[in-house]
Image (cartoon, rainbow, N blue to C red):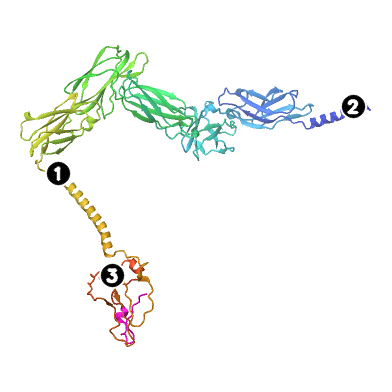
């Protein structure tokens, strides 16, 4: 039983082996190229083949033109690649290349597909490295460059770029074209148009523009950050000049956003007065947003340039004005007309210095740098010329021998000229005084420390110059009062600023006249008159307010309360010929309130004598003064009417003999 099973397995194995031999797959996917255009570059051919290394040897054929023409063969044994020199094959004309080997059983020849190449141009460049690709970017375009050192000078190139926003998945073909510098100095240049101002990733590949050439593999993804439109603006804080002639300067700025990637900064400090010296200091910084430096007391131009992988932004700059403090030493300046002589003492050993003579408001001159070595404690002199009515800053700057840093030894502001005519003067006069106010001229007010004092002068019009009176006041004063002047007299006055480089003196040239002793300022009189009118108006308004209350109280006095009096009692029925005496007096009557009122009831005969109301004894009533003021509401609320005939009494019918007048006493 066992031998039968064994023979069955052997038969199955033989059948499978025979089937494999029948369907054995030979060499395939043949590819030949070289990495450069030069003759020294070998032609590399690769292919795929199934099986193990024990398969039969393989032969690579290069045939001129068609496969049945002259061929050159190369045995490869069990490998799947071969590198051949160009001079060993037909490289200058079209060649047909194929690979062939025997099958496992040796009964058949297995052959790859035929491939046709012009081998001298069958170039496939290596994959571009990320470090080989340089780029520059603006908001709307991206410029890519990489070196072309493959000895393909006369061959036209073909380039492709694909692009995608960062953190996106899909690549898109870039809208690109060859740049104007493409092919110059063995450099490839591609310009791509960008749709959005966002970070991108790009890949590039290239080849020779020929049907035998192959595309290189896509390069590694290159991150392209957003371009920096402009360098950030700086904010500077400068400390006071120390005793060593230096000051601490702090610069601060805002760092660009994360879309700009890694940003570096370059700071350039330029010492303005000493242009002929080594005055530029460059400091490269990383991603920081502030910097502290020790600088001299001279004026500086400071520029800041931001850059990232996309390129460098335009630099921002600021002007650092010179320090106002004089410095560790004093400059002794002597004047002889417009010429000056400055003497100073070196505070330390220096390997060079420059003397600054800068007219404020003008560009700093190119001061020559002196390479003379200075010894600490030695005296040195510098001279120069000054322009009239111009402020100058004189300063000495030196480079320390031990640190090679610039420091300011000393400085001073000087002014040469006569500023009296340019100084506006305002006068306020009285009978025996005159107050002078002035403002220093602009060129002198911008010259700190140059004014030592102000000299004022005045004299009467017509007097000789020898009669001029002079007054001195401090450099901080802006007004002065002339006292003990003669009334109604014309004077001349002037103000002069005294500086170290004096170029003139006080000269009275402004005319004014004192007033009469009894004259008073009209403005003051008008002020008191307006105040009196205002007070009178307030008093009149107050008097009217209080008198209005008194008039109302006198015209309409308050009514008495009738409750609890006989005026509201119901009288019993009266017999014929009877009467009641009521102590009632209407408010409008002028008689005595205690006088009784006589009421007579008319008899049946209807005589006229008994039908009237009479006062006993009769007395003539005093007439009330006429008034148009309506009665107060309290009169109406009690149902009382003023005395006088009503419309019914005036316009009603005449009573008959049986009806007499009645009084409603209820």
Are there few (<14), some (14-19), or many (20+) residues within 10 Å of tag 1? few
Are there few (<14), some (14-19), or many (20+) residues within 10 Å of tag 2? few
Mark 1 or mark 3, earlier in chain:
1
Instruction: From this view, report whether residue 324 is shown above or below residue 424.
Output: above
Residue nearest the viewer, comparing 249 with 603: 603
Of tags 2 and 1, which is closer to the observer?
1
Q: Looking at the magenta stretch, what is its main secondary structure?
A: loop
Q: How many marks?
A: 3
- Residue at x 29% of width, y 83% of height: 610
Residue nearest the viewer, comparing 626 with 360: 626
Kindly state the secondary structure of the residue where label 1 is placed.
loop
Residue 264 appears anywhere in the view = yes
Are there few (<14), some (14-19), or many (20+) residues within 10 Å of tag 3? few
Which residue is denoted by mark 3 in the rendering? 594
Q: Is residue 95 magenta?
A: no
User: Label 2, label 1: how many angstroms apart (C-alpha)?
Assistant: 146 Å
Residue 24: percent from left, percent from top: 77, 31
The stretch of residues the image draws in magenta is 647-666
Contact (Cβ within 8 Å) of mark 2 with mark 3: no
Which residue is denoted by mark 2 in the rendering? 6
User: Label 1, label 3: how many angstroms apart (C-alpha)?
Assistant: 72 Å
Q: Is residue 659 magenta?
A: yes
User: Label 2, label 3: how many angstroms apart (C-alpha)?
Assistant: 168 Å
Kindly state the secondary structure of the residue where label 3 is placed.
loop
Which residue is denoted by mark 1 in the rendering? 521
């Amino acid at each position: 039983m066992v031998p039968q099973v064994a023979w069955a397995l052997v038969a199955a194995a033989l059948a499978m082996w025979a089937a494999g031999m029948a369907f054995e797959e030979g060499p395939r996917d043949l590819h030949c190229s070289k990495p450069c255009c030069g003759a020294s570059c070998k032609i590399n051919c690769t292919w795929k083949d199934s099986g193990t290394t024990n398969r039969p040897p393989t032969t690579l054929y290069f045939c001129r033109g068609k496969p049945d023409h002259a061929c050159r063969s190369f045995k490869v044994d069990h490998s799947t690649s071969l590198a051949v020199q160009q001079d060993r094959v037909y490289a200058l004309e079209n060649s047909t290349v194929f690979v062939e080997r025997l099958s496992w059983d040796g009964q058949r020849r297995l052959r790859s597909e035929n491939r046709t190449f012009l081998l001298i141009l069958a170039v496939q460049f290596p994959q571009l490295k990320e470090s080989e690709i340089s780029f520059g970017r603006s908001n709307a375009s991206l410029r890519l460059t990489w070196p072309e050192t493959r000895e393909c000078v006369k061959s036209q190139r073909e380039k492709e770029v694909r692009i995608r926003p960062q953190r996106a998945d899909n690549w898109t073909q870039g809208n690109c074209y060859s740049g104007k510098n493409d092919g110059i100095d063995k450099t490839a240049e591609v310009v791509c148009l960008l749709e959005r101002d966002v970070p991108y990733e790009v890949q590039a590949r290239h080849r020779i523009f020929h049907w035998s050439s192959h595309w290189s593999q896509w390069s590694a993804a290159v991150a392209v950050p957003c371009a920096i439109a402009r360098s950030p603006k700086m904010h500077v804080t400068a400390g006071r000049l120390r005793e060593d002639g230096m000051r601490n300067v702090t610069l601060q700025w805002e760092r660009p956003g994360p879309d700009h990637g890694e940003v570096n900064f370059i700071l350039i400090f330029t010492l303005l007065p000493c242009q002929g010296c080594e005055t530029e200091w460059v400091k490269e910084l990383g991603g920081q947003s502030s910097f502290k430096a020790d600088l001299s007391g001279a004026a500086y131009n400071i520029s800041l340039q931001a850059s990232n992988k996309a390129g460098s932004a335009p630099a921002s700059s600021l002007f650092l004005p010179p320090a106002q403090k004089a410095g560790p030493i004093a400059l002794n300046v002597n004047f002889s007309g417009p010429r000056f002589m400055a003497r100073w003492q070196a505070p330390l050993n220096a390997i060079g210095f420059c003397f600054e003579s800068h007219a404020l408001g003008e560009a700093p001159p190119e001061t020559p740098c002196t390479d003379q070595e200075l010894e600490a404690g030695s005296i040195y002199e510098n001279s120069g010329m000054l322009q009239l009515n111009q402020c100058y800053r004189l300063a000495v700057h030196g480079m320390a021998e031990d640190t090679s840093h610039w420091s300011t030894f000393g400085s001073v502001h000087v002014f040469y000229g006569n500023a009296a005519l340019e100084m506006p003067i305002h006068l306020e006069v009285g009978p025996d005084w005159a107050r002078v106010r002035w403002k220093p001229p602009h060129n002198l007010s911008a010259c700190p420390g140059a004014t030592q004092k102000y000299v004022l002068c005045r004299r009467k019009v017509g007097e000789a110059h020898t009669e001029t009176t002079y007054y001195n006041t401090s450099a901080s004063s802006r007004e002065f009062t002339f006292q003990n002047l003669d009334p109604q007299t014309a004077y001349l006055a002037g103000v002069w600023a005294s500086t170290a480089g004096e170029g003139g003196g006080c000269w009275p040239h402004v005319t004014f006249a004192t007033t009469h002793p009894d004259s008073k300022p009209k403005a003051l009189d008008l002020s008191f008159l307006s105040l009196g009118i205002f007070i009178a108006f307030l008093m009149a308004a107050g008097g009217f307010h209080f008198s209005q209350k008194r008039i109302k109280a006198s015209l309409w006095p308050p009514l008495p309360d009738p409750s609890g009096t006989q005026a509201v009692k119901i009288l019993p029925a009266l017999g014929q010929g009877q009467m009641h005496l009521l102590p009632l007096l209407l408010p409008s009557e002028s008689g005595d309130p205690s006088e009784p009122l006589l009421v007579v009831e008319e008899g049946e005969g209807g005589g006229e004598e008994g039908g009237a109301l009479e006062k006993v004894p009769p007395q003539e009533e005093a007439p009330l003064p006429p008034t148009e003021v309506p009665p107060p509401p309290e009169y109406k609320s009690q149902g009382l009417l003023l005395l006088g005939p009503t419309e019914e009494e005036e316009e009603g019918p005449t009573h008959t003999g049986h009806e007499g007048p009645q009084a409603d006493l209820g």
